[in-house]
Image (cartoon, grey):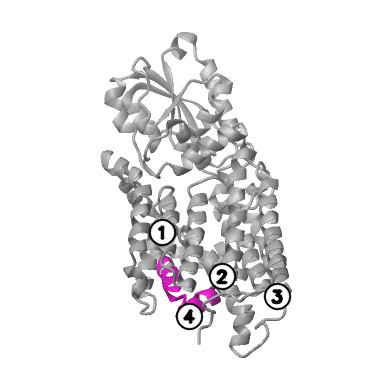
Amino acid sequence: MDTITAAAPAPTAASRALASKAVWLVAAAAFAAEMALSARYGYVRDELYFLASGQHLAAGGVDQPELTPLLARLDALVTGNTLVGLRALPALAFAGLVLLTGSMARQLGASRPGQLVAALATACCAEYLGAMHELTTTTPDFFCWTVALLLITRLLTSRDPRWWVAVGAAAGVGLAAKWNIGFLLAGLLLGFACTPSARPLLRSRYLAAGALLAAALAAPDIAWQAAHGWPNLDVFGALQQDAWANRAFYWPAQLLYTSIVLAPLWVRGLVAALRSAALRPAGIAAMAVIAVQFVLGGKPYYPGGVYPFLFAAGAAALFTGAGAAQAGRGRPVVRHWARYCAWFCAGAAVSSVISLPVLPAAALARFPAQKVNYDLGEQIGWPSEVRLLASVWRALPSPERGRATLLAGNYGEAGAVARYGPSLGLPAVYSGANNFWLWGPPPAADTAAVAVGIDPVLLRREFTQVRLVARWNNGLGVADDEQGTPVYLATGLRGGWAQAWPAFRHYD
């Protein structure tokens, strides 16, 4: 007999209303918590990059498709280009994850307490607390995974192949944000192929229609990549340099990133899905995605989109309504669901110290939470760094300033100058990092540069004189990637920018 029922029970109207209200309250609380901390530190480097990319929209990009830059551009237009406004979008997506998880649990047969537990697990998941705090490619990626998995559960429980079209739409939007959802699609095909009872669904014309829809939505980025020599492969190659370090931390991270208190729930969900003839394709897909990312040396958060399904499946296995009665039990498997809720909230309170900017920024010097959550440190000090560049720029003699350009070593620095520089009177910034390299080179008349975070060896190769003029300090003693970044004045460009610019390119 299946561990998880193949279809949801038929609750009364009052039961549905109560369950829905509780899940919506959890979603509202998740949104409120994110917004309360939205401007606690500052932009993360990827957000600055996507804001800049939003000003140069194209069919694709060096390191990601263009959905996230498009979202950043639209959000900036609607909210007045504010940090709080930018963070509202991922906070809404986080609330959406909570609602979708509760809906999945209901679809899988969870009782009202089970739906609440599943939704609360997502709201308390350390990985989602951190990732959905900021607008990066992970935001639409996780959201599209969750939508696709909800649609897959409806396909599996209803046996209605028309759901394939909706799955294709969700997958296509996900591919327009990040190629990562391709691993889920491959895992699902494997799961359906390995499950005899589900295999006939692969022969549906609706699957072909969904696949065509997904391909059409992904096509612009694929065409852009082909036209530009597949730069994304260079980015993947650079990421592979960290493969062994990722593997060493991968399995502990699956516990820490979700939260140790939530691990028993998602492990139970995985086991229950694999045991259920109805849900085995999704269970195989989840297991395959987690395993393949380890083998490939992917970052530990890459399979994070499968956990809403596993939370829902675990809650359905623990808290069944009609399913328990059909199994001859007649009552929920676990009585004290409130203990789960309290335990999850306690875990979230602890993990939020690392997942979110709860601590004062200065406290990171004594409690280096950014060693686990890299983005915490990368939200500190960008306006101050740009002000330092502005002071160096204004100190240049007017004739020299008239033939100088601004160079930045990474896309965070370049994005920060693009965001804050205009209000300080700085000119356009140029960088060899990822998409920024495509937007260069600097004007041909510029023969000098104020360069931040660029290898002095490269500068000395391209300029006759290179002098260290400043070094940025965040003033908090926080050891992040920007602390101690040097600022150079380089003069006497040896050749033209058309000759020099290829040397500055780096994709990572």
Q: Nearer the viewer, residue 20 or 258?
A: 20
Residue displayed at 32% across by 60% down:
208
Which of label 4 and label 1 is nearer to you? 1
**Callout 3, which amino acid?**
Trp
Q: State the predominant SS element of the stretch in magenta.
A: helix
**Callout 2, which amino acid?**
Gln
* First in sequence: mark 1 vs mark 2: 2
Q: Are marks 4 and 2 in contact (CB under 8 Å)?
A: no
Per the image, the residue denoted by label 3 is: 337
Left or right of 201, for residue 338: right
Count of numbered marks: 4
Q: CA distance from mark 3 to mark 1?
A: 36 Å
Q: CA distance from mark 4 to mark 1?
A: 24 Å
Say if the magenta span includes residue 75: no
Q: Secondary structure at mark 2?
A: helix
Q: Which residues are magenta?
A: 267-289
